[in-house]
Amino acid sequence: MNTPEPLRLLHWNIHSWQDPNGGKNVEQVAGLIAETRPHVVSLVEVDETFAAADNLAHAADGYVSIFIPALVYGTAEDVFGNALLTRLPLLAVQHWPLRHPAPHYDGTEPTEQRTLTCVRIHHHNTPIWIGTTHLPRTDHTERTRTLHQLHTITHHLTTPWIIAGDFNTPSTWTNHNGLTTAPTNTPTYPAPNPTEPIDYCIANAHTTLDGSVLTHPGSDHQPILVTAHFA
């Protein structure tokens, strides 16, 4: 009996399509996706023009893309949020706000809405939920609230599930929640010399995750590549 191929997931905070020097990184993001060829891609800090998403369309060549903006800014034609790309059969999409009530966005990081976007895909005839999120950085109290809300939502997801994100806090918060994490305690931010382990995947306890941080100059975060085996 053949062992099913593990699901492979690439996650990256792409810094509004900018490298650490402020140059455009769309080709670098597209190149890494093409090189690693994961089943699912999680991208956060996706910055697009309303109804166009041209940068995402280029990076997502060969994938189905799901982009549900968390906020609108500027002239109301600019949108910002997280995206999922998949080359597996897509069964469903869910999108959840993590801050209630939604804050009034005034252009600052503490007033950004935070969300969880999930897709349900088929992998070797098994339905799996995959999510992407990006949590508050400067407000510890609000980050704790969104972590609690995130954990509450996962209780309602059909297992197995995986959520990738820039959690802006080390994965030690998962220890008392019985979750699986990967990679663990490997710094991802700020690139090119990261010191903070804030980008990783979490999963239900019966899912086995293996992950590594990739060295790449395309953003202020390093990308991660995770493989998942399901019980």
Image (spheres, grey):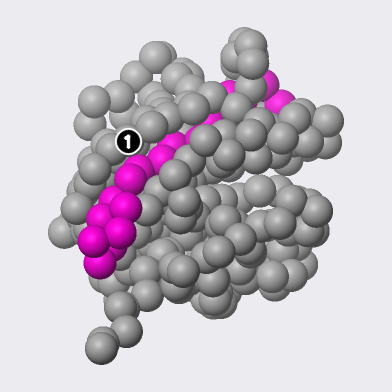
User: What stretch of residues is rendered in magenta?
Assistant: 110-127
Q: Is residue 3 left or right of residue 18?
A: left
Residue 118 is a magenta residue: yes
The residue nearer to you, when weighing 197 against 4, is 4
Q: Horizontal and vertical percent for residue 160?
A: 46, 55
Q: Is residue 225 shown above or below 42?
A: below
Q: Horizontal and vertical percent for residue 199?
A: 62, 58
Q: Going 66% across and 57% down the picture, which residue do you hit? A: 179
Q: Horizontal and vertical percent for residue 46?
A: 43, 41
Amino acid at the residue labelled 1: Val
Question: Which residue is tagged 1?
Answer: 93
Q: Going 37% across and 69% down the picture, which residue do you hit? A: 7
Q: Horizontal and vertical percent for residue 95?
A: 42, 30
- Determine the residue located farthest toward the right in the rendered image: 141
Q: What SS does tag 1 mark?
A: strand
| Dot 1 alpha-carbon crowd within 10 angstroms: few under 14, some 14 to 19, many 20 or more | some
Residue 79 sits in quarter: top left
Overall secondary structure of the magenta section: strand
- Determine the residue located farthest toward the bottom in the rendered image: 1
Residue 222 visible somewhere in the drawing: no
Residue 168 is a magenta residue: no
The residue nearer to you, when weighing 220 against 231, is 231
Q: Is residue 186 shown above or below 76?
A: below
- Determine the residue located farthest toward the front in the rendered image: 1
Q: Going 71% across and 27% down the picture, which residue do you hit? A: 110
